[in-house]
Each structure stands twice: as structure tokens, then as C-alpha cells.
Image (cartoon, helix red, strand yellow):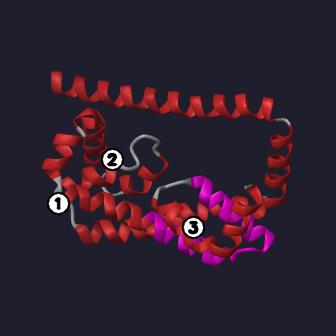
Amino acid sequence: MEELFIGWLKEYGYAILYLWSILEGEMGLIMGGIMSHTGDMQYFMTVFVAGLGGFTGDQIYFYVGRFNKGFIQRKLHKQRLKFAIAHLLLKKYGWPIIFMQRYMYGLRTVIPMSIGITKYSAKKFALINLISAWVWAAATVTPAYFYGAEILNLLAHAKQHWYFALPIAGGFLYGIYAYFQKLERHLLQKRNDRFSK
């Protein structure tokens, strides 16, 4: 199964990377960087395609917000706190939040939808989003390209010693999740404090 997956990546690498990037998976970009390192993909093409995928994904979310405000309010009411945070961040930081949202776990899909709900210029969003997507792609692919051999060695070691690797990976992911949960509570508290004054 593993050899089949690797074969697919080598044959359809750019198409898989594009689709993976639409779903906003850094793992796909890291894999693209490693495959650029091994010569199975071309570095600049990898960054270009990954950036286009990230751009496409956020454009979809933006237009979901722009043309489906009622649907979002009905179906995503459980996410209303995140939408409130996204509006707060947009109001506080303006357009740079389009750059920052790619690195904000739990808000990556909410922020483009939230911007879409507002009267923010679709052309301006698209331009900033495209530049942001290519910066994101380059920032993720490049380290994997330069350190591909080390990453492959680490993955081989983790595969052999999975009983150590799984708890470490789980702890790392939980730490990221806990950090952004804390950040979310902090932003909500600031919002509530501001409105209570």
C-alpha cells in the first residue's frame, strides 16, 4: 500500500499537491518539498502549484461567505464564536489577517468565510490571498526541500520506533491545539471586556 501511494505521488504529484493544498494540508507541502529534494518533483513548480491550491481553497471559502450568509448562520451556528473572533481580528489588523490566517489553527477556513460575509473587496482579497498563498507555499516547501534527507531519515526512524513516535507526535499536536484554544479564549475575553465597558 505504501509503495502504491508513493507511486501515485511520483506519477500524479502536482495534481495531488494542488488538491491537498485546497484542503490546506501542510503535510502535502512538506511531502512536495521532500519529493523536490529527491528529484521526483521540481522545486519552483511545487511552490507554484501549492500556492495555487491554497489560493483556490481560500477563494472557495470567501465566496461561500459572500453568497451564502444565511446558510452559514443556519448551519455553522456552533462556530459563531470563531466567526466573532475572525471579525475582531479583521477589524483590528485589516488586510494582514489574510496573511496570518494560514497559520491560525481552527480559524483557517472561518476567516475567509468571515471576510466574505463583509463588504470587503473581492478583488483586493484575491490579490492579497494569491500573494499570501505563494508565501505560505514557499515557507513550507523550502525547509522540506533543503532538509529532505534529514526528514526522510527521521521518518524511517519513526517508522521503526513507532511506539515512541506516536506519543511524541500526539503530544505535539495536542500542544498546538491547546495553545490555539487558549488564544481563542483570550480573544473572546478581550472582546467581551470591550463590549462590557
Q: Quadrant of the N terminus?
A: bottom right
Badge 2: residue crowd in 10 Å (few <14, some 14–19, many ≥20)? many
Quadrant assignment, res 164: top right
**In the rendered structure, which segment of residues is drawn in magenta?**
26-54
Residue 46 magenta = yes
Estimate the x, y position of residue 31 in percent, counting from the top left: 68, 60
Quadrant where the C terminus sits is top left
Q: Secondary structure at mark 2?
A: helix
Q: Earlier in the sequence, mark 2 or mark 3?
A: 3
Picture coordinates of residue 139 (x, y %)? 60, 60
Task: Identify the residue at horizontal 77%, vertical 63% (top origin).
Answer: 146
Kind of residue sitting beneath label 1: Phe
Q: Is the residue 165 above or below the residue 91 in the image?
A: above
Local packing at callout 3 (Cα closer than 10 Å; few below 14, some 14-19, many 20+) is some
Residue type (three-letter) at the residue carrying disc 3: Ile
Which circle, 2 or 3, is nearer the viewer? Answer: 3
Q: CA distance from mark 2 to mark 1?
A: 15 Å
Give the residue displayed 68% in from the left and 75% down from the top.
11
Residue type at numbered disc 2: Val
